[in-house]
Structure formats: structure tokens, C-alpha cells
Amino acid sequence: MKKVIGIIICLVIVIVFCFAVTAFNSSEQKDKVSEPSTLTPNTSESIEPTGTYVEKRGVFTYNDQKIQYLLIFPAEYTQTTNRWPLILFLHGRSSCGQDLNLVKNYGPPWFAERNTDFPFVVLAPQCAEGEDWLNKPDSLTALLDDVYKTYRIDQDRVYLTGTSLGGNGTWCLAGQHPEYFAAIAPLASQPIIPNSWNKQLIAMPVWAFHGEKDSIHPLKNDEAMINALRMQGGTPRFTILPDQGHYIAGVYKNHEIYDWFLTNTRQQ
């Protein structure tokens, strides 16, 4: 009888031990499966390293108004952790609408996609048909703030430029929010001389371009703005293009304007 009891006790001990080992192994496997999720890298940029430029498209809403926009990143952006200078480009009237491909017809977006060593991120919003950049200064700065949250932008090297309708928008946006920009370059514009001047705009580096024979936005209007700015103590550069009319977007095909941008940083 004692032998039978002893055998039963041994069997119970063996069964309990087996259950314990099985439970331990199951728990260990669960722990191992859960490990990778805690190690998964997280980035809001969603840009994979590449050997060419990266184009991103988006829609930004501000005060119930939507602006669609194009972002172009140089290949080197995807291969570094640096913060990059940015050009905000405001297109002219011919690129208004709902087709974002229109904003790549000329200007910094066109240049960025054809020059692998282009050292800027380009932000090119699109103005809807019948609208005007003059009514969007707050929307544009809100868009900039949104881009800053997601991408590696050097906020001390943000530059503003535009031609025709976009040239007017450049003067307007810089006049209302000069704190955002290190330098501006309006082309073929017809600016409105402000009644009161922002000191940051007066001190800002400006390089304006205008065609000598512009019949759409007469040269005299841009000259008046430049002279008024100089009277306030500003030191803008002003290039008059001999024998050229209103369409002077070829300026953007020259490295000189981009080299000049990089000589300027935002004044605090």
C-alpha cells in the first residue's frame, strides 16, 4: 500500500512540474513576440532615402479655406539629418487652378527637379482660379508653420519669391509677416507702397527683378516701391532686364539668385 501511495505522489509531482515548464515557455514566447513593436522607429516625415528628388503633395486647411501645395525635397535631404533652407514660391496667374502640375512649369519647382545638387526644399502652394495671394498672408504663414512641424527646415533660412501675381504676393506677405523670412525676391510685380512701414521689412534683404518693357505691370510701379523703400533706409537690389517684357521667369534658371539667398539668414 505504501508503495502505491509513493508512486501516486511521484506522478503528481511530475505532472505539476510539466505544467510549470509549459507555462513558463509560453510566457517567454509571448514576451519575445511583443519586443519588436517597442523597437519600431517612428517618423512623421515618411521619406525614404533616395538618389533623386522627392515630391510630396498635400492639402492644408486654414479657417475653412483649403490650399493645395507641392513640396520638393533634394535627394540629399533624405540622406542626412540636417535642417534645410526652404524657398516659398508663389506662382503667377497662369498657374492658378486645381492642377498642381501647373506650379512646376517654371520657377524654383521646375529648377529643383532638374538640378540634383539644388540645396533647398521648395514649397509651392497653388492659388485657386479667381483668387489672389494678397488675401492669403495668414494662410501661407500657417502653412509654413505646419511644414515646420513635420520636416527638417532651418527657420533662419527661409526665402520668399514669386513672379507677377506671385511677385505682388511676395511684397504683401513680407510686409505683413517679415519675421518669417531671411530674404525676398519679387519678380515682375506691381506692389502697393504701404502707408506705414514694418521695420523688419525695411531691414530685409530684397532683390527685385523687372522687365524694361513690361506692359502688364509697368516698370514705374516697381521703381516707385524700390525708391520708397530706399527712402525708409532700406538697401534693396533692383535689376532691370533690358528689352524684356512681363514674362521674366527665366531669372529662376540662374544659380545667382539661389546663391544670393544663401548669403542671408533671418534677422532676429
Image (tube, rainbow, N blue to C red):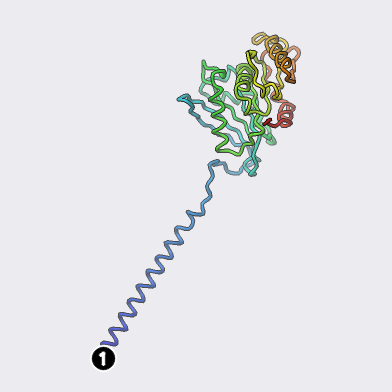
Image quadrant holding the C terminus, namely: top right
65 or 122, nearer to the observer: 65
Image quadrant holding the N terminus, namely: bottom left
The answer to whether 80 is drawn above or below residue 225 in the figure is below
Question: Could you tell whether 137 is left or right of 119 in the image?
Answer: left
Question: Could you tell whether 49 is left or right of 208 in the image?
Answer: left
* Residue 205 placement: quadrant: top right
Residue at image point 71% right, 18% down: 209
Other residues around mark 1 within 10 Å, as few (<14) / some (14–19) / many (≥20): few
Q: Which residue is mark 1?
A: 2
From the top left corner, tell me how far across and down residue 144 is, in percent. Answer: 57, 30
**Residue 190 visible in this rendered orientation of the protein:** no
205 or 253, nearer to the observer: 205
140 or 107, nearer to the observer: 140
* Residue sticking out furthest to the left: 1
Total labels: the figure holds: 1
* Residue 215 placement: quadrant: top right
The answer to whether 91 is drawn above or below residue 192 in the figure is below
From the top left corner, tell me how far across and down residue 219 is, in percent. Answer: 70, 10
Name the element at disc 1. Answer: helix
Q: Amino acid at mark 1?
A: Lys
The answer to whether 81 is drawn above or below residue 159 in the figure is below
From the top left corner, tell me how far across and down residue 188 is, in percent. Answer: 67, 16
From the top left corner, tell me how far across and down residue 117 is, in percent. Answer: 70, 36
**Residue 197 visible in this rendered orientation of the protein:** yes
Residue at image point 55% right, 38% down: 150
Residue at image point 58% right, 38% down: 151
